[in-house]
Image (cartoon, rainbow, N blue to C red):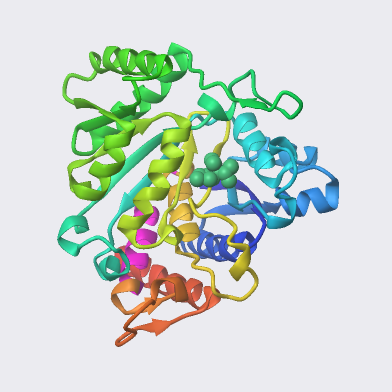
């Protein structure tokens, strides 16, 4: 299997965590005789400093010429006063748009060993396994007109969807549900927003093609509450861009740390893979960052771009295993540390690689 991967590590903890994800991929390539090539390019704040723009053309060209793009994180406090499109985050939105992936898959699961890290009670979160499908290229993020008019003292954005945009992401969500527990929850705000009424009508219509999937609709405000109260009730959840942004951060509470959550964006020219967490500038460069979200993102590359399901599952199993063994990065080791080993970013990466290696060896015997 050959894969050309462009690595855009970005800002803050991005380089540290993607370094560990790449190391895991290299190990798998070596062990399985696969040919993965990695090209590093700049994005975000580091690109603004070096190239004067958050998404240099060179980065975009490399990304478009690859099979998968692995992104770390973007964002740095020094650029906070810039206009949205000039900020590091602008580079992320531009690369998302250029690669064309509209379905952002964000799995959310509880790890038994990490239930103590969640403020929610173990009996509420244990066994949670939700697949969020966040529409990534529409809604208020990209809608026009948009403006902050300082003279007039007015600012506005446009939350807009076409039925085609809703249909294509709904289809992916239904297909995922068919392969899982056959339940799809569509989230909108159709009691107030016309754009949500369109959303609900289109999802309902697409649902007719998937009679084996139970479809339910939820309003985003009460959904925010249901996710905390009864997360196990949800299988696949599909929603628009901004609601998905908010609900997936919220669902990080179930896992106990945003540092654990991966994502894959599919449906476009080139798939884009990024952990859900941000650049965490406060802990950058200190070896404190949790690389597991990035490593689980690497597993998604293996699954969705490489078709290497066994290898993807081995990485996911290895992450569970090291947690079982008591290995934690600092963010995961709050409170009572009895029985836990607190590891640096690099040590955690090494531990996962060692475990993946053993898993794959055992499987090949
Ligand atoms: C995310 C992030 C981004 C988003 C930011 C950094 C632009 O919060 O991936 O969830 O809002 O999509
Ligand atoms: Mn977000």
Position of residue 185 measured from the top left corner of the image (x, y, whole percent): 26, 31
Q: Quadrant of residue 320?
A: bottom left
- Per the image, is 311 magenta? yes
Q: Residue at x 29, y 27 (%)?
A: 174
Q: Residue at x 75, y 43 (%)?
A: 82
* Of 2 and 52, the residue lying toward us: 52
Give above or below for 171 relative to 62: above
Residue 308 visible? The answer is no
Position of residue 217 measured from the top left corner of the image (x, y, whole percent): 25, 26
Which range is magenta? 307-322
* Of 323 and 163, the residue lying toward us: 163
Q: Quadrant of residue 56?
A: top right
Give above or below for 354 relative to 58: below
- Per the image, is 254 magenta? no
Q: Is residue 185 found left or right of 12 in the rendered image?
A: left
Q: Quadrant of the C terminus?
A: bottom left
Give above or below for 267 relative to 337: above
* Of 208 and 306, the residue lying toward us: 208
| Ligand 1: image quarter | top right
Q: Residue at x 30, y 68 (%)?
A: 114
Total marks placed: 0
Position of residue 110 measured from the top left corner of the image (x, y, whole percent): 28, 58
């Amino acid at each position: 299997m050959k894969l050309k991967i462009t690595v855009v590590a970005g800002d803050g903890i991005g380089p540290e965590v993607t370094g560990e994800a790449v190391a895991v991929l290299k190990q798998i390539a070596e062990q399985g005789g696969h040919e993965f090539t990695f090209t590093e390019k700049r994005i975000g704040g580091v690109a603004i400093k070096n190239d004067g723009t958050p998404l240099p053309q060179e980065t975009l060209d490399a990304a478009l010429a690859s099979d998968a793009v692995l992104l770390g994180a973007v964002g740095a406090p020094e650029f906070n006063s810039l206009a949205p499109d000039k900020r590091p985050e602008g580079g992320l939105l531009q690369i998302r748009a250029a690669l064309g992936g509209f379905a952002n898959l964000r799995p959310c699961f509880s790890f038994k060993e990490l239930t103590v890290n969640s403020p929610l009670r173990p009996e509420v979160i244990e066994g949670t396994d939700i697949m969020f499908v966040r529409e990534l290229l529409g809604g208020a993020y990209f809608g026009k007109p948009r403006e902050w008019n300082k003279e007039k003292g007015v600012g506005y954005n446009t939350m807009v969807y076409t039925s085609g945009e809703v249909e294509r992401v709904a289809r992916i969500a239904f297909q995922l549900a068919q392969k899982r527990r056959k339940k799809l929850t569509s989230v909108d705000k159709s009691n107030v927003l016309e754009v949500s009424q369109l959303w609900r009508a289109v999802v309902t219509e697409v649902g007719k093609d998937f009679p084996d999937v139970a479809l339910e609709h939820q309003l985003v405000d009460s959904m925010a509450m249901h996710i905390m109260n009864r997360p196990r009730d949800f299988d696949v959840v599909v929603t628009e861009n901004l609601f998905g942004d908010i609900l997936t951060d919220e669902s990080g509470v179930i896992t106990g740390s945003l540092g654990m959550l991966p994502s894959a964006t599919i449906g476009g020219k080139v798939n884009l893979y990024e952990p859900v967490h941000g650049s965490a500038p406060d802990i950058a460069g200190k070896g404190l960052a949790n690389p597991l979200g990035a490593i689980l993102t690497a597993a998604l590359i293996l699954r969705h771009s490489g078709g290497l399901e066994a290898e993807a599952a081995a990485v996911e199993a290895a992450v569970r295993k090291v947690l079982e063994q008591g290995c934690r990065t600092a963010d995961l080791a709050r409170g009572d540390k009895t029985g836990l080993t607190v590891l640096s970013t690099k040590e955690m990466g090494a531990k996962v690689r060692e475990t993946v290696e053993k898993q794959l060896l055992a499987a090949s015997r």
